[in-house]
Amino acid sequence: MSNMIEEEKNCQNSNVFPAVSRESVIAKYCLIDLGIRSNPFGDPFKHGELRACIQDIIGTIDRQKELSFIDTYLDFKKAAASFVDKGIGTEHILPLTGKYLIEIVAESFLEKDDEVIITTSSSFDIVLLLQEKGIKVNYQDIRFLAEITDRSLNTAKMVVISNPHFLSGALLPSDEVELLAKRCKDNGTLLFVDETLIELSDPYQSVASVVRENEYILIQRSISDTFALSEKQITFAITSHNLIGKLKPSIIENKEDLSSLILGTSLMNSGCNSKYIKKSREFIRKQRAYLVELFSKHGYVPEHSDSVHILVNLKLLMGLKELTQRLESHGVMLMDCSSFYSPGEDYVRVAVTTQDNIDRFEEIFGIVMGEWAKDYANEKLSDVMNRGSLSGSNTECPYYPCHFPGQDCTFCYCPFNPCKEEKTGGEWIIGSKGKKGWSCMNCYLIHKPEIAQAVLGILLQQDDLENSLGKAWSKVIKPVI
């Protein structure tokens, strides 16, 4: 509880990651974890209406020895049913603290060699968990749920989907999920729907009301993600009373769970449209739009998202693995999606975060690109000198011609950069943050074959590289500017 009410530390997102530390991360920058999947608005107890709850919760927890576990458990169920606001009762709620619903479902209803359909909307962790239990995973890369055939539903024991999408953050319309739920019921197939972030997207797209008439659907909700409580694992299942009775375990009295149940009850009593959650949605929409704009102006087009993260294709010259490693060295974490079956090897998931974090990320991204360009230039310069001849025009390069048709691409990255000599055609430009930077966009000199050959000739004289570059500048470049 102390983690929830202590004052914010130096790091902007310390309230989300109260004790985070990575030896591999350079402490030059505060850690920015853009791979997370939680409410970026922050600690609910630092926001108006919920601030007053702190003392009541602390007092209740202090008296927990006098409380009946069953009474606390029932209070949680009442709060959850009201919070979901879909006409369901307490008989449809199963509280879970520190337990993973998908694992409980697998142990309750699945056996080795059973088949489960998992769509690409779901967390890949579910795939790994089921495979470890010997369950056959039919991983389907589909855009619309209607693409799941009745034949595959008939042979599968369960279907797993996430709404919103685990990677892209896009929401599925509730009527599409409801139709799949009906088809699953007709085929005797269990439907598992992960709705852990739906309150932060659009709670009206929830299909929780379906459990009143359909015993083949289980829905997962997360208080931890909705209220940015990363140090707590508080979730609950929404399903039929009959299915709850078949889940293993059902109710296990554990005094250690009391504080989590009391905390969850208090938070949900404020409702799914409380000021905190409404402000959270507004904050997420605003910051998500800013994040999309940031990537778009650099030429990357994020996929549509309704959630707390965006999916971006970062096809870069250095490769995604190197990019993420370089960013991590500066304390920025992204979710590399290259190991997933979908969407592809160049995709990353980037979490919505505070304006300060986005600004710092943009600055660090520029630093990383500059560092890579310098390393790449040195590597290519070494290759050129070892080859001892010009490479000519690299017409296979996706950026060719970056300056003019017929250009020589031997020095893809100019060995004189930044020369800071405006007579070359280079110029100082002002970036989006008002900072001055050197641009070589309008300098063609190093790509003219005769100049590239003259520069190479001097560099091949085996002199000290720095001295050679100085000679090349004074003897080749300076006379022509």
Image (spheres, rainbow, N blue to C red):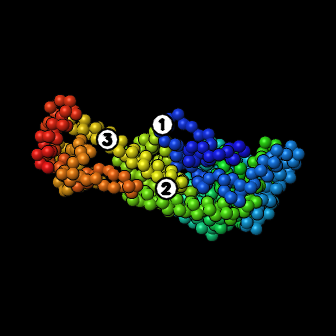
Nearest-to-viewer mark from 3 and 2 = 3
Residue 420 at least partly seen: yes
Relative to 189, is 396 on the left or the right? left
- Label 3 packing within 10 angstroms: few (<14), some (14-19), many (20+): some
x 26%, y 40%: residue: 380
Label 1 sits on a secondary structure element that is loop
Relative to 201, is 269 on the left or the right? right
- Decide which of tag 3 and tag 1 comes sooner along the chain: 1
> Label 3 to label 2, Cα distance in Å?
28 Å
Residue 167 at least partly seen: no
Residues at circles 1 and 2 in contact by the CB criterion of under 8 Å: no
For this orientation, the residue located farthest to the bottom is 175
Front one among 239 and 351: 351
Q: Position of residue 121 (x, y in %)?
A: 56, 57
- Decide which of tag 3 and tag 2 comes sooner along the chain: 2
> Label 3 to label 1, Cα distance in Å?
20 Å
- Label 2 packing within 10 angstroms: few (<14), some (14-19), many (20+): many
Hey, what amino acid is under mark 2? Leu
x 29%, y 37%: residue: 379
Hey, what amino acid is under mark 3? Lys
Nearest-to-viewer mark from 1 and 2 = 1
> Which labelled disc corresponds to residue 311?
2
In the figure, 193 relative to 256: above or below?
Answer: below
x 74%, y 55%: residue: 52
x 60%, y 43%: residue: 9
Give the labeled residue for mark 3.
Answer: 374
> Which labelled disc corresponds to residue 26?
1
Hey, what amino acid is under mark 1? Ile
Viewport quadrant of the N terminus: top right
Q: Position of residue 102 (x, y in %)?
A: 67, 50
